[in-house]
Amino acid sequence: MQLLDGKSCSEQIRQEIAQTVSEIRASKDRVPHLAAVLVGNDGASENYVAFKVKDCAEVGFDSTLIRLDATISEQELLDKIDELNRNEAIDGFIVQLPLPAHIDENKVILAIDPAKDVDGFCPENVGKLSLGLPTFISATPNGIMELFRRYDIETEGKNCVVLGRSNIVGTPMAVLMSRNSNPGNATVTIAHSRTKNLTELCASADILIVAIGKTEFVTADMVKPGAVVVDVGQTRVPDDSKKSGFRNVGDVDFENVKDKCSYITYVTGGVGPMTRASLLQNTLKAHQRR
């Protein structure tokens, strides 16, 4: 078993981006600028946005954090998005999800200029992804593809099961793995909690990508010997033995699955750092396009 080390790969990517930013500065051009909109004070969202601001500073990007009260109206948020769309100094921006219940997330996603949609969530970018056209790819699927690329994981002709069908991870992941590309060219099945014979299906996969949002859902009997397993899940569970009072758990029962795998990600230092690095890549791409 070998770990797919997202932390190490993401550090390489950030170094590459930082070098490009140095060259941009040397040419007297404006450096890439990422903005993040945070509505309310959800703890997990606070952490995610803080990491993104830190990542920007590390590679030399400018960043702006826009904090909005949880009671903001939907129209006020849409007005802020329109302002960011028209701001020539900002190359890309994200609206951190989830949003308060009174705000329609789909309306928010639709309001973002596709040219600044570095999360890759808007319909135009999703459509281009499906057609294999240049676009912003959702950060988590793109990060996983980059892991496969940098570890030279063979995907062509492999049986790939994507467990989870979200618009953010599962669906774009399946599209990317099935495309005529490298990595890609896999035979892909999208599975979910209502799939019949789920254990047998997962156990047939050469590559198993798990994003179902249920802690330790994938057990050893669901994994083919020698499979490549990517765990997208991350959930905090109480743990009195930890100083923080909690530990992070993935969607895969790592301890009981790891010895069956050729490659596997760990819940910390796996997919998460690659997601953050992919957002930086998309922001750099947005700057270059502009």
Image: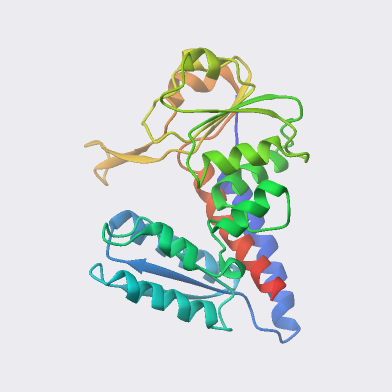
Above or below, 170 relative to 244: above
Above or below, 110 relative to 232: below
Image location of residue 47, percent across then percent down? 37, 58
Which one is in front, 272 or 255? 272
Image location of residue 181, percent across then percent down? 78, 41
Q: Residue at x 65, y 43 (%)?
A: 145
Quadrant in which the N terminus is drawn = top right
Left or right of 198 on screen, residue 92: right
How many numbered marks have been drawn onto this rendered protein structure?
0
Which one is in front, 169 or 124? 124
Image location of residue 146, percent across then percent down? 67, 46
Left or right of 109 on screen, residue 43: left
Q: How is the image coloured?
A: rainbow
Q: Does residue 5 appear in this view?
A: no
Q: Does residue 28 appear in this view?
A: yes
Q: For residue 263, what is the image quadrant?
A: top right
Quadrant in which the C terminus is drawn = bottom right
Q: Residue at x 41, y 69 (%)?
A: 37
Left or right of 73 on screen, residue 28: right
Q: Which residue is drawn at 62% across and 75% down?
A: 32
Image location of residue 182, percent across then percent down? 77, 40
Above or below, 245 relative to 2: below
Q: Residue furthest bottom?
A: 28
Q: For residue 147, what is the image quadrant?
A: top right
